[in-house]
Image (tube, rainbow, N blue to C red):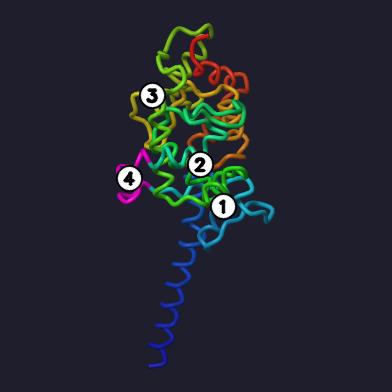
Amino acid sequence: MKTFGTKAVLVIGATAALAWSVSFIAMPLIQAREEGIDWFTSLCRAAGFSAAPGGQPARQMGSVSLVTWSPSVLERLAKANITKGEEIAADVCAACHNPNGMSADAATMPSLAGQPARALYKQLWDMKNGTRVNEAMKPLMENLKDDEIADVALYYSERKPRNQDFRLERENSKATLRLVTQGDSARALPACQSCHDTAGGGPIDAPNLVGQYPRYMSNQLHAFADGIRRNDMFARMRTIAAKLTPQETDALANYYDGPR
């Protein structure tokens, strides 16, 4: 009986050790590689809290988005109320983003007009929950329920976008047009339009780049490249932006601003 009991304890101990290794070593390593975060941050998240290297809270730099496109979230967006969204926009958003979505500061505030509702919802929800750091927006979003965020996202998605008649045209720089339409296979860079085509077809939360303010877009690409902004799903934009030269980043931002 003692031998059987000892074996049972050993089996249970080995099983527990294996489960611990999978949960706190193997899985964090896999998730870190898939989502473009460091192992320590992934380990902390597995343990139930978030931290960044150096012991600083992860949200100081932003962290991996917690948005999930579950049936309940998609239903929330499908049932969003544009009238309520207009009321919320007037009370909360219009001072900076104007009722038409053409924001007041082209360097720090995006054009919201005509953006897909799902893209707007994700960014606003990330700001509410701290995975996208924006000290000005966070307290405003904290006061809104998720249904209200969906309402205001729908409202701004229905506004007339900047340069809405923009079409892909010949660009002075063939290299820029090639990045937009073909990408660069040598650097494993996909074509921008493969995700950000105005006709859809990219990731569910991909924003529309056409008509976005060039300074804002350039600033965000640089933030992704530097790892300051980290709320992109599966580290898509961090991976892509880090491969672009500063000149390419600025050229793409100017391209999507539309004809000049």
Which residue is tagged 3? 197
Nearer-N-terminus badge (4/3):
4
Q: Mark 2 near mark 1, Cβ–Cβ under 8 Å?
A: no
Which residue is tagged 4? 74
**Mark 2 to mark 3: distance in Å?**
32 Å
Which residue is tagged 2? 91
Tell me the amino acid under the disc marked 4.
Answer: Leu
Q: Quadrant of the N terminus?
A: bottom left
Side of 163 relative to 213 (left or right): left
**Mark 1 to mark 3: distance in Å?**
33 Å
Indicate whether residue 160 is drawn in magenta. no
Mark 2 or 4: the one toward you: 2
Numbered range of the magenta stretch: 69-83
- State the residue in front, 3 or 21: 21
User: Label for residue 39?
Assistant: 1
Disc 4 secondary structure class: helix
Q: Position of residue 260 (x, y in %)?
A: 53, 9
